[in-house]
Image (tube, helix red, strand yellow):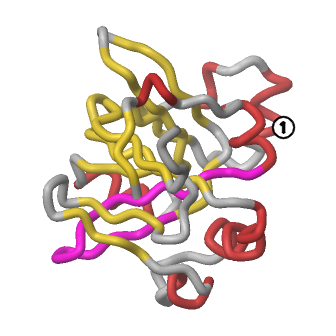
């Protein structure tokens, strides 16, 4: 994959997350890692840094890896991998090696001590800056009923984008 300046990112993040989703991975090769499909999040600027942010439910197995890890990756795959992405979003890594069963594989980056999805079209390698537990009781009632009828709140993770990798060739 090619390293690029994050300011060269030219995709529609709204469309990417809503229609194609991303794979969020946390942990490392030595202590273990896990990943899950995410569609709630975004990218932007905060504290003078390029950041990515994701929301992960506290009940998800990957949540514990996010809590312990400094490094986080967001891997974006083409829609040719939609079934694999769906599998990663539906099955827990607590009980099986869901990445292997999805047909996907990972690449380990020893410099940042992170893993990302090898088949990705592009990847954000990030360092966690902040995690905030969200309280669904503070939401307006219609949102609370729609997204938290069973109380399973999210944690917001804000991460500095340290590297942007892409399979696209340089112009």
Which residue does the image show at 59% across and 53% down from the upper left? Answer: 76
Residue nearest the observer in this picture, 95 or 158? 158
Toward the top, the furthest residue is 48
**Residue 128 percent coordinates (x, y):** 28, 38
**Residue 109 percent coordinates (x, y):** 24, 63
Q: Quadrant of residue 32?
A: bottom left
Toward the front, the furthest residue is 171
Q: Kindly tell me whether residue 135 is visible in this rendering.
A: no
Horizontal relation, residue 22 to residue 130: left or right = right
From which residue to which does the magenta span run?
20-35
Residue nearest the observer in this picture, 52 or 7? 7
Horizontal relation, residue 80 to residue 5: left or right = right
**Could you tell me which secondary element the residue under label 1 belongs to?**
helix
**Image label count:** 1
Which residue does the image show at 70% across and 60% down from the upper left? Answer: 78
Task: Determine whether 155 is above or below 77 in the image.
Answer: above
Residue nearest the observer in this picture, 146 or 5? 5
**Residue 43 percent coordinates (x, y):** 52, 27
Q: Kindly tell me whether residue 53 is visible in this rendering.
A: yes
Q: Residues within 10 Å of mark 1 (few under 14, many from 20)?
A: few
Task: Determine whether 15 is above or below 7 in the image.
Answer: below
Horizontal relation, residue 116 to residue 11: left or right = left
The magenta stretch spans residue 106: no
Which residue does the image show at 76% across and 75% down from the upper left? Answer: 83
Which residue does the image show at 68% across and 21% down from the upper left? Answer: 139
Which residue corresponds to mark 1? 146
**Residue 56 percent coordinates (x, y):** 53, 47
Horizontal relation, residue 113 to residue 48: left or right = left
Q: Main secondary structure of the magenta part?
A: strand
Residue nearest the observer in this picture, 152 or 83? 83
């Amino acid at each position: 994959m090619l390293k690029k300046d994050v300011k060269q990112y030219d995709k529609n993040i709204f469309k990417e997350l809503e229609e194609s989703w991303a794979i969020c991975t946390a942990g490392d090769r030595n202590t273990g890692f896990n990943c899950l499909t995410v569609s709630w999040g975004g990218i932007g600027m905060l504290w003078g840094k390029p950041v990515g942010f994701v929301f992960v439910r506290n009940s998800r197995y990957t949540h514990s890896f996010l809590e312990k890890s400094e490094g986080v990756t967001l891997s974006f795959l083409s829609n040719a991998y939609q079934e694999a992405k769906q599998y990663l979003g539906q099955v827990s890594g607590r009980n099986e090696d869901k990445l292997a069963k999805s047909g996907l594989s990972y690449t380990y980056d020893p410099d940042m001590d992170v893993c990302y999805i090898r088949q990705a079209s592009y990847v954000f390698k990030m360092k966690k800056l902040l995690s905030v537990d969200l309280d669904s009781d503070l939401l307006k009632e219609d949102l609370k009923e729609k997204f938290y009828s069973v109380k399973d709140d999210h944690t917001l993770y804000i991460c500095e984008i340290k590297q942007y990798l892409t399979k696209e060739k340089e112009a």
